[in-house]
Image (cartoon, rainbow, N blue to C red):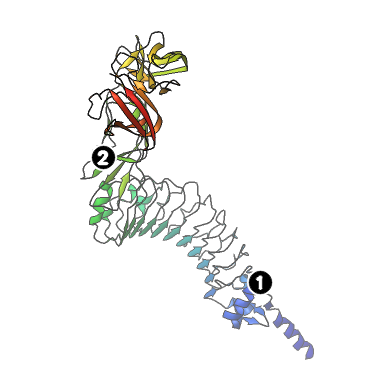
Amino acid sequence: MAFVLVGFKVIAQDHLVEIPDPNFRAKLELSYPSLMKDGKLDTIKAASVFDELILESSNINDVTGITYFKNISILKLSKNHLTTIPDISGLTNLRGLYLSYNNITSLPDLSTLVNLWDLQVQNNLLKKLPALPNSSNLGSLYFAENLITELPDLSGYVNLEYLIASKNKVNGFQDVSAFKKLKELHLNDMGIDKITGLQELHFLEKFYGQSNLLTDLSDLKTNTTLKTFNVGNNNLSSLPDLLAKPNLNEVDISGNYLTFEDILPLQNHPQFSKFNYSFQKEFIIDQNLELKDQTDSFIYDPKVDVTLPVTYQWFKNGIADNTNKSSALTLSPLTPEQSGKYYQEIRLAALPSLVLKSTDMDIKVKPCIELSYKSLNILSENCKEGYSIEIQEVEYKGGTAPYRFGIKSISKSDTLTLDNFRYNNLEAGIYKFTVSDQFNCKGSTSSFTLQKPKDCQAVFSPNGDGYMDSYFIESPGKIKILDSGRNLIRELIAPAVWDGTKTDGSMADAGYYAIVINENNVINITLIR
């Protein structure tokens, strides 16, 4: 009798197993104390659990022992610290498996779980999905925010209602036309540029496709069940007919290439509770243009929203051009000074929160003749007769011969013709080396300065004889010219040349004058007639 009783006790103890992970064990003792005895799991009682086993948020690292719960229908292990899952192929009654928010890198074969309806493994470290159930019962598949780059063929799961795949860098997404019962499709942040089969999703209620490279979603035009349409941050320049979707209430179309003509009609939808359309990406205009001056006027018109009462504003180098309020940018005549970065802003009073802005158009206007020289040689300088100079190693291209070369003072309208690239009797001042051809195509170099010769008296005689006709003010700053009675007769910004004229253009009388630089330095000068 004693032998029999002892034998019975040993057999009974065989139903108790150790649970290695202390947090797993503690969770069972706390939430399922009837399954535990002396700190061990009673496997007979574990097998008698037919409903759900809830082990979420319990700091579990290892679920060794979970296979004894072979009859459970729901297993919740989300928000733990799991990296692997043991072989659960024997848990064939499972309808829901929840493993989200762990650190799982791989999953065991799930092909035997033919009753599985809901599989959620999002927010893990999976590089691929495991073998999925060998049945079409799967109705909900969540694997967002993993490291998955390739997917198995899912087309056999024709009863899928929820497909949540966001934030995986899958190389293209498979045809979704087989999922005709689909209610929710989440494909945001996947880097995809096309979704095939959307025209078959007649029961789709929620579509999340934001932060991709999508250019066309016209296949959704026949769907009338949509409630949520989130496609922000894509490359869409058109939309399916959203007004034909009576249940639609949440829409995000921001960050695309849509215009006021696309967006304005949607304000008439009867039940938008959320409608986000601002901002839109910069619409693209020609990026880099290289033009020649002395040609016909340059006109560029992006032709955006020309049928609506929009207002246009062009900017050059970030500064608004208030002289141009038209759709087109017109530059006439073309000159090198018109080089710069141009962009356009478009506004519509009916949508005040949205400003459509273009990309920068970098315009470079080059002279129709490109002119340069290697060096400028000063042959002589004299207070009375001025400078003699020689332009050396002249290079030019463009235009049509014959050419005319010259020296032009920035303070005078006429150009002094050069003879063999030499010129005499140049006054101190700022000059450019110029060229023109038989069709008056022009070019010039950057300016150069001839300083006043040293030890020259402050005297000039603006009589047009070519000698000492002007006075060059070298020091930079704001200039005031006062007559002998301290009356202001002229203001300039130096470096500058005073040609003896007053503000009204008349010639000043002979006499003594004071040139005041920045209200501080004074040059006393004599004007001789």
Circle number at residue 258: none
Residue 181: x and y in percent read 38, 59
Judge whether residue 364 can be spotted in this image. Answer: no
Image quadrant where residue 203 sits: bottom left
What's the amino acid at mark 1?
Answer: Asp
The residue lying toward the viewer, choosing from 253 and 487, is 487
Quarter placement of the N terminus: bottom right
Above or below: residue 211 compared with residue 292: below
Q: Residue at x 30, y 59 (%)?
A: 248
The outermost residue toward the bottom is: 1
Image quadrant where residue 276 sits: bottom left
Secondary structure of the residue carrying tag 1 is loop
Read off the residue under disc 2. Answer: 322
The residue lying toward the viewer, choosing from 379 and 178, is 379
Q: Is residue 12 left or right of residue 96?
A: right
What's the amino acid at mark 2?
Answer: Asn
Quarter placement of the C terminus: top left
Judge whether residue 260 can be spotted in this image. Answer: yes
Distance in Å between CA atoms under marks 2 and 1:
73 Å
Compare marks 2 and 1 and give the one earlier in the sequence: 1
Q: Mark 1, residues whose alpha carbon is within 10 Å: few (<14), some, or many (≥20)?
A: some
Nearest to the eye among marks 2 and 1: give it.
2
Q: Is residue 6 left or right of residue 477?
A: right
Q: Residue at x 57, y 53 (%)?
A: 127
Residue 173: x and y in percent read 46, 49
The residue lying toward the viewer, choosing from 412 and 272, is 412
Residue 184: x and y in percent read 40, 59
Residue 147: x and y in percent read 55, 53
Q: Are marks 2 and 1 in contact (CB under 8 Å)?
A: no
Q: Residue at x 55, y 71 (%)?
A: 57
Q: Is residue 143 left or right of residue 24?
A: left
Read off the residue under disc 1. Answer: 21
